Amino acid sequence: MGLKLSHWALLGGGAGVIALGVAGVKLNTIAHTGAAYKAKVACSEIFLAGRTRGAVLASDFDNIDPLLDRMPVTVDGAKRQTIASGPLGLGRAKATFRDGYGCTLKNKTPLAALPAIAPVAPEPWIDATINSDLTIDRVDTKKLNALVEAAFADSAAGNRALLVAVDGKIVAEGYADGISKTTRLASWSMAKSVTATVLGAAVLRGLVALDDPAPVREWQGDAARSKITWSDLLHMQSGLAFDENYAGMRSDVNLMLFHKDDAGAYAADKPAIYPPGEHWAYSSGTVNLLARTLRQVLEEAGLDYYAFARDEIYAPIGAASITMEPDASGTPIGSSYVYATARDWARLGELYLRGGVWGTKRILPEGWPDYVAIPATASDNQYGAYFWLNRDGKPAREGATTRARFVPGLPEDAYFMSGHEGQFVFIIPSKNMMIVRTGITRGRPAIAASAPLIAALYDAVEAPE
């Protein structure tokens, strides 16, 4: 996700608005996109991540657009909500925090009632950074520590959390000022990989068959869309129209995330413009449609989406902090809004390294980690099943001039969760290694900016014999 506010020039002042003669409803829509973005981020960072209002407002909206800086945010601690608005009071947006569910934007309809969520018991990590008896011979601890220290000394890099695990043990870990191992960190599009994980748990239990048509209720009787399978949705090859353009203030993705109370329903209404399975296009709408449909399937089986994810995934792996934030209809916004500590992001990566098994419990289908890392047929080797792949591809990637991997210093077997502004979980089976990096990288492609550090961390660990 990369919100751009170039359209805010239309909102420079009352006289300018009148002179432009632009319809008020259009201006309000544009203003609401920015206000909703600011209200939602502020709400989640203050009430869910637990950061201070001053720290969030001072840093989290920098270098997006000067006019976004001028949009005031009201923080109501008693009601646990934030309100933001654009110039002239246009586009007013409110986000509300609820225990267990994080923050939700309220647009036109009341927030759907959701049941209380039982907490997950945290499980301690095996932490080699504080126990020298757990030293792994193939890990250059001194080099890792130097890399982590340098990463946080460089304020321009925007790193917030770094964690490296090898053989199921934390071997390096570091945090920026104001962030700690207990701070929940935003996913942005890493949430897509979480959605794939919940779907995998449903597949294991026989609730979903990937090659079956997705039972989207709006598609019944539709000759084209009723043929779209779960697999098509999972590989971004549904063929549905969707404008994933964050610079367009009224694009599909901005309308879906910041204006609509039911993100999946918005995506379900998009027309089919390609046959399913033949065209790859990155679409957050696809993910929210899948999450909504999966919620429906689970409820038909007498299961609650949130309780299912907690009981079948998060509780077994001891990931107590994972919070899936819903839209106003109550469905998790599976494309974008999950919060978890760095250690719990690492647990999800570790689950894949362990083949979908934790202890004696199988959580994901046998072969699921291999499945999500198989390239979607039309994706130029870059994308699997809601995971990005580190395979050679066309020069168009991130400005490369030759066929290149996203992180040239990592092997082809690496695959990763990836989110806006540089949220990453790299899973590297050939070294039984996993790297978490979160932060705010703006003004340049986050993957390219982070690649040298990720490659250096990788190089500090030898392959197992």
Image (cartoon, rainbow, N blue to C red):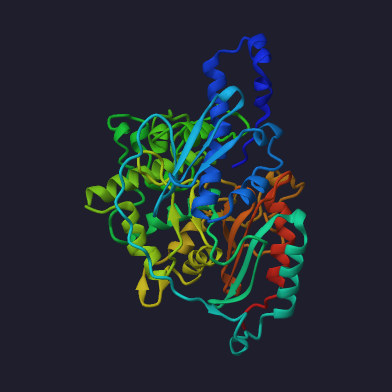
Residue 121's place in the image compared with 118, above or below, is below
**Based on the displayed image, in which of its 4 quarters is residue 198 positioned?**
bottom left
Work out whether residue 65 or residue 281 is closer to the camera in this orientation and state it: 65
Q: Quadrant of the C terminus?
A: bottom right
Q: Residue at x 45, y 46 (%)?
A: 80
The spot of residue 33 in percent (x, y) is: 55, 31
Q: Where is residue 225 in the image (x, y as percent from the top left)?
A: 37, 33
The quarter in which the N terminus is drawn is top right
Whole-percent x, y for residue 350 in the image: 50, 69
In the picture, measured across the screen, residue 131 lies left or right of residue 398, that is left
- The residue depicted at 47 percent of the width and 63 percent of the height is 369
Pick whichever, 249 or 464, lies toward us. 249
> Which residue is rendered at x = 65% and y = 21% of the image?
11
* Farthest-out residue, bottom: 133
Q: Can residue 260 be seen in this view?
A: yes
Give above or below for 263 relative to 453.
Answer: above
Answer whether residue 376 is visible to the viewer in this image: no
User: Residue 71, how many percent across, how many down?
Assistant: 62, 33
Question: Which of the 4 image quadrants contains residue 417?
Answer: bottom right
Judge whether 406 appears above or below 242 on screen: below
